[in-house]
Image (cartoon, rainbow, N blue to C red):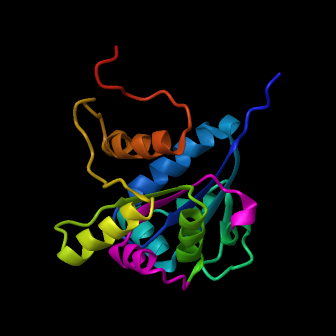
Amino acid sequence: MQKQNKHKIIVAVTGASGSIYAKVLLDKLVKLSDQIAEVGVIMSDNAKDVWRHELGNSDYEKIPFKIYSKSDFYAPFASGSAKYNSMIICPCSMGTMARIASGISNDLTTRAADVILKERRKLILINRDTPLSLIHINNMKTITEAGGIICPASPSFYSNPADFEALAATVVDRAIDLCGLEQDSYRWGEK
């Protein structure tokens, strides 16, 4: 019998608008727990403020995964030896993206992203800002060239999403697929 390797995932939530994406991502990871060994969560103070403003609640306090302080450089994923497979930054602020592109590891989110890139693992940034400046585009290019994946929070509509969570899931499902997790989700051309 072959042992199934379970995923170790880092989720960072920044203060960019789009808390619905983080909520849907965390909810889906709970449902996929049979494929996951560990999820470590980092949430900035701004992320908590934006969540309360946009979603009208403090449900981030109920996240069933370990939440690490943004300054906790003793978190396991602050080192490549912890062997986390993937990191999703959702939503990813342009400031966070700029620090990652510049190699500035001034908090746990940017340090973990640096580790994921140097270890050649999957870094997925779900950015929501629009329009984009040339600085944003160049930072995206730099991260892509370093092996990161830019997964803009541009929802699709061909699945006829019934509500905001289903709409957000059209983006989140892509990020989950990119991590290599198996899930039931809408697939173009499939019944």
Q: Does 186 appear in magenta?
A: no
Give the side of residue 25 with respect to residue 187, left or right. right
Q: How many marks?
A: 0
Query: Residue lying furthest right in this view?
Result: 1
Q: Is residue 28 visible?
A: yes
Give the residues drawn in magenta, as a range: 80-106
- Residue 141: x %, y % from top left: 31, 66
- Residue 105: x %, y % from top left: 54, 82
Look at the image and tell me in which quarter the N terminus lies: top right
Instruction: Residue 68: name its quadrant.
Output: bottom right
Give above or below for 30 relative to 140: above
Q: Is residue 56 visible?
A: no
Give the side of residue 52 with respect to residue 108, left or right. left
Q: Residue at x 29, y 34 (%)?
A: 162
Comparing 102 with 64, the one in front is: 102
Give the side of residue 156 with respect to residue 186, left or right. left
- Residue 88: x %, y % from top left: 50, 57
Q: Does 82 appear in magenta?
A: yes
Instruction: Residue 18: name its quadrant.
Output: bottom left
- Residue 137: x %, y % from top left: 24, 69
Comparing 99 with 144, the one in front is: 144
Q: Residue at x 31, y 54 (%)?
A: 153
Look at the image and tell me in which quarter the C terminus lies: top left
Q: Residue at x 36, y 64 (%)?
A: 54
Give the side of residue 157 with respect to residue 6, left or right. left
Give above or below for 180 relative to 22: above
Give above or below for 38 relative to 78: above
Q: Residue at x 28, y 19 (%)?
A: 189
